[in-house]
Image: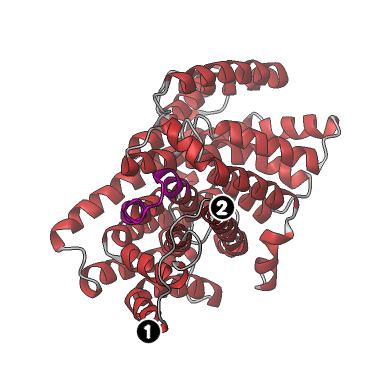
């Protein structure tokens, strides 16, 4: 999975399309922004060579600063250290560690059993259980690929064994796994908050209602298709069986209450909540459920450190890139251009959606946010767009990007589980993907969906 986080997918068709789109974008940037447009042209050119995004960012910034700018080197060094000296960044490795403990610690298995007991008797019961289990696991993991791995590796073989087509199971889990970055806690939201100095707590609360709505939408698509094609249904579970399943997964569900309840009540900050969730997940996995042996702990720690280092390296270089954007006044130039051409809020948000979806073809979510958020955010503020609503809009776009080729992380994770090709998986997720695009437009133009809960809670 880490290979896909750092670089573009090695697909011939996707790479050719990326080259064409990248060259066009580079020429457009130079035409619109002049000297400043060279920054984007250089960045796009380096990424098209297949160079890791973090190194592309760093080389772009250093090349421009040393040869085309008069910014003192001392200022660059100082910004490099002060830019990542943010308390919120500490939440990222803790949430990654918690997700690893939960993935391998038996929590996912018990959440699936609970979800199956609750909705398994409906049309497409195991598919609906997959959506519900993904939503529950998303509320404790903060990562989409981790959700797909945890739920998909257990549920997909069970669905095939029960008589569901492999395409149906793959479509449900690949798209429902994207809930991992929308339902709080969310690593992607933390990265957005770091990039734009927004409130992590407000973003977490803003993701609750859209996350539940999207889970309901994805479940509805699964139910409709299961009913239309007469897919299997499980026997109705008794209330005794449901209570037994609830008791078994209650330790995992309590983490949701601890994290969100603690943040809302003011007992601890989102970063402290991340640390508490990591410790709690360790205790549950090792001492309560006992599904993780002491021998497996070093691997979980090493995997978490590997992923955290990769993200922090990208963040470090993105901080320099953001500094370059500010020093060259690129956001202001773009804002003046948009306002000068009478592009209002509606047109701007449409352009943002298209830009983010296009970026999703060649980059993964963390890189997209760290590169584009510092550029788009000031423009959005000038147009009067709420920063929290803008963050949820970007997050939903990232969800869609994780489910379409060529760099859809969820597709690659699901491909590893199902042994299906990316093309085959793309066809499998299409019904859910169409629904997600419609939901994205709803979130874009109805900010009350995102802002109702934060406003009610006083954020």
Image quadrant in which the C terminus is located:
bottom right
Q: Which residue is denoted by mark 1 in the rendering?
A: 240
Q: Residue furthest left?
A: 295
Query: What residue is rendered at 64% in x and 21% in y?
Result: 37
Which scheme is used to colour this image of the protein? secondary structure
Is residue 100 rendered to the left or right of residue 394?
left
Q: Secondary structure at mark 2?
A: helix
Q: Quadrant of residue 310?
A: top left
How packed mark 2 is, by other alpha carbons closer than 10 Å (few <14, some 14-19, many 20 or more), is few
Work out how far the residue at label 1 is from the one at label 2, CA to CA, in angstroms.
Answer: 31 Å
Q: Which residue is denoted by mark 2 in the rendering?
A: 228
The image position of residue 378, as x and y in percent, is 69, 42
Q: Quadrant of residue 243?
A: bottom left
Query: What residue is rendered at 63% in x and 44% in y?
Result: 437
Q: Main secondary structure of the magenta part?
A: helix
Depth check, front residue: 85 or 337: 337
Between label 1 and label 2, give the one nearer the viewer: 2
The image position of residue 113, as x and y in percent, is 35, 68
The image position of residue 363, as x and y in percent, is 49, 33
Query: What residue is rendered at 65% in x and 50% in y?
Result: 439
Depth check, front residue: 366 or 21: 21
The image position of residue 284, as x and y in percent, is 28, 71
């Amino acid at each position: 999975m880490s290979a896909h986080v750092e670089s573009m997918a090695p697909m011939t068709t996707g790479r050719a399309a990326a080259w064409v789109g990248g060259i066009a974008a580079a020429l457009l940037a130079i035409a619109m922004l002049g000297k400043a447009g060279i920054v984007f042209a250089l960045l796009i050119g380096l990424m098209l060579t297949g160079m890791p995004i973090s190194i592309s960012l760093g080389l772009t910034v250093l090349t421009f600063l040393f040869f085309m700018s008069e910014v003192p080197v001392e200022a660059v060094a100082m910004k490099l250290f002060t830019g990542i000296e943010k308390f919120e960044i500490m939440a990222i490795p803790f949430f990654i560690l918690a997700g690893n403990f939960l993935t391998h610690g038996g929590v996912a298995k018990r959440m699936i059993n609970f979800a199956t007991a609750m909705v398994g008797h409906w049309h497409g019961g195991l598919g609906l259980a997959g959506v519900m289990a993904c939503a529950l696991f998303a509320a404790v993991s903060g990562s989409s690929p981790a959700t797909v791995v945890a739920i998909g590796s257990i549920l997909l073989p069970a669905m095939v064994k029960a008589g569901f087509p492999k395409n149906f199971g793959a479509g449900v889990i690949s798209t429902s796994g994207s809930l991992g970055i929308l339902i709080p806690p969310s690593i992607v939201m933390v990265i957005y908050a770091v990039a734009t100095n927004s409130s992590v707590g407000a973003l977490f609360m803003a993701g609750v209602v859209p996350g539940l709505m999207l889970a309901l939408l994805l479940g509805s698509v699964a139910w409709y298709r299961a009913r239309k094609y007469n897919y299997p249904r499980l026997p109705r579970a008794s209330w005794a069986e449901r209570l037994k399943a609830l008791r078994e997964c209650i330790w995992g569900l309590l983490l949701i209450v601890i994290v969100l309840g603690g943040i809302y009540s003011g007992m601890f900050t989102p970063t402290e909540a991340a640390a508490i969730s990591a410790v709690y997940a360790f205790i549950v996995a090792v001492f309560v459920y006992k599904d993780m042996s002491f021998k497996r702990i070093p691997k979980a720690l090493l995997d978490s450190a590997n992923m955290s280092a990769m993200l922090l390296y990208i963040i470090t270089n993105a901080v320099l890139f953001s500094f370059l954007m500010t020093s060259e006044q690129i956001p202001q130039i773009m804002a003046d251009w948009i306002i000068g051409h009478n592009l209002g809020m509606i047109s701007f948000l449409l352009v943002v959606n298209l830009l983010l979806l296009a970026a999703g073809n060649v980059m993964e979510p963390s890189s997209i946010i760290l590169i584009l958020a510092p550029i788009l955010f000031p423009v959005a503020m000038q147009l009067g767009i709420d920063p929290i609503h803008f963050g949820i809009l970007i997050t939903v776009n990232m969800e869609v990007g994780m489910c379409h080729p060529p760099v859809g992380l969820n597709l690659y994770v699901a491909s590893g589980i199902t042994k299906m090709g990316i093309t085959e998986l793309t066809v499998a997720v299409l019904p859910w993907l169409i629904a997600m695009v419609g939901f994205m437009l709803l979130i874009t133009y109805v900010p009350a969906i995102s802002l109702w809960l934060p406003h009610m809670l006083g954020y």
